[in-house]
Image (cartoon, helix red, strand yellow):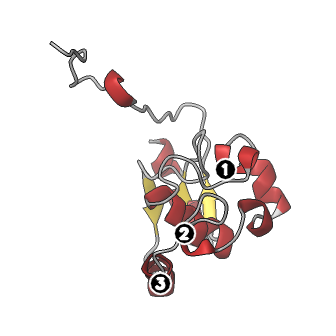
Amino acid sequence: EAWFAGLARFRASSAKLLATPDGESPVNTGLFWVKPDMALFELGKRLFKTVKYNITHGIGLVGRPSELMTESARALYKDTRMVRQNTYDFTGGASDQGIFTIVFSLLNKSLESTRISFYKMHHFWASAKPWVRTPSCL
């Protein structure tokens, strides 16, 4: 319901991606809306095709997060590991969450974030997944 309330605003905006940040990065790819854009798609493909990545400069070695983020983005995402540690060493940093953050937030400034208090993303971590039984060596 919260996401649908923002649909008209998102569609009318210049933003290309609407996502919720998490403790790791500005983009949680568990749930997001994206407006199709061939140029941004091609940019993402080009970055992946470089086959270059490290935790300091990201996919395609685009640069450190602190060098690419605006002051307002740093303030907005100050609680993420990416900003706190100036790193791409976060969950999905070398894959989906990394490429969406780089393409839509750092390089094109076309990310819109939603932080609605009654909207919550529930994560299942490691062995806490409900379908995994207690690990055992027996």
Q: Residue 46 bears which disc, if any?
A: 3
Per the model, the C-alpha gap separating discs 3 and 2 is: 10 Å
Q: Pointer 3: residues within 10 angstroms few (<14), some, or many (20+)?
A: few
Q: Amino acid at mark 2?
A: Ile
Regarding residue 109, the answer to whether it shows in the image is no
Q: Amino acid at mark 1?
A: Met
Q: Residue 95 bears which disc, if any?
A: none
Q: Secondary structure at mark 1?
A: helix
Foreground residue among 34 and 55: 55
Q: Residue 59 bears which disc, if any?
A: 2
Q: Amino acid at mark 3?
A: Arg
Per the model, the C-alpha gap separating discs 1 and 3 is: 22 Å
Report x, y in % for residue 101: 58, 62
Q: Which residue is mark 1?
A: 82
Q: Is residue 93 above or below residue 42?
A: above
x 61%, y 55%: residue: 88
Report x, y in % for residue 135: 24, 18
Is 82 left or right of 50, judged from the image as shown?
Answer: right
Q: Secondary structure at mark 2?
A: helix
